[in-house]
Image (cartoon, rainbow, N blue to C red):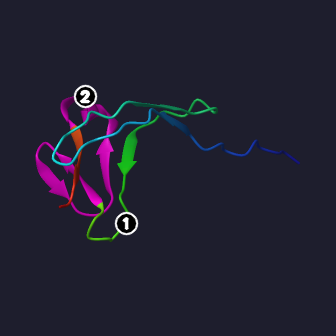
Amino acid sequence: MTTQKANQAPVVTASNQTVNAGASITPSFSVTDADGDRISHYYFSDLNSSSTSGYFTLNGTRQNGPFTICRRFSCRYRLCFDRRL
């Protein structure tokens, strides 16, 4: 019988940030994986459907629902969070 160690989920560390209505922020976060697995995609979502909820924009384009950014492109994109008014 051979046993295998269970895969451990990646851990995200992010700083708390406050943004005013109409302003943009550049998020700051890091991702580590205890198993040493390569992090290849970042997944962002705002699952709040309230009319006062915020939404993500990527290079000025509003993103509806969850979306994924491939790691190899992450340095070329600016992720912003806008608040619906």
Q: Would you identify the image quadrant in which residue 71 lies?
A: top left
Q: Marks 1/2: CA distance?
A: 27 Å
Amino acid on which disc 2 is placed: Cys
Q: Which residue is mark 1?
A: 48
For the residue labelled by badge 1, is the local secondary structure a helix, a strand or a loop? loop
Above/below status of 49 relative to 25: below
Whether 45 is drawn above or below 38: the answer is below
Pick whichever, 35 or 21, lies toward us: 21
Residue 28: give x, y in percent of width and height.
37, 30
Q: Is residue 70 magenta?
A: yes
Is 23 included in the stretch rendered in magenta?
no
Q: Is residue 18 left or right of residue 82?
A: right
Q: Earlier in the sequence, mark 1 or mark 2?
A: 1
Looking at the rendered image, the disc whose residue lies closer to the viewer, 1 or 2, is 1
Residue appearing at x 29%, y 32% in the figure: 72
Q: Are marks 1 and 2 in contact (CB under 8 Å)?
A: no
Label 2 sits on residue: 75
Q: Nearer the viewer, residue 48 or 18?
A: 18
For image coordinates 36% across by 56% down, the residue present is 45
Q: Secondary structure at mark 2?
A: helix
Q: Position of residue 12 (x, y in %)?
A: 51, 37
Question: In the image, is 15 to the left or to the right of 9?
Answer: left
Task: Give the number of the disc on residue 22.
Answer: none
- Quarter of the image with the C terminus is bottom left
Label 2 neighbourhood size at 10 Å, few (<14), some (14-19), many (20+)?
Answer: few
- The amino acid type found where label 1 is placed reads Asn
Q: Is residue 64 above or below residue 32?
A: below
Q: Which residues are magenta?
A: 54-78
Q: Position of residue 22 (x, y in %)?
A: 15, 47
Residue 46 location, x and y as percent? Answer: 35, 59
What's the residue at 44%, 32% (across, down)? 15
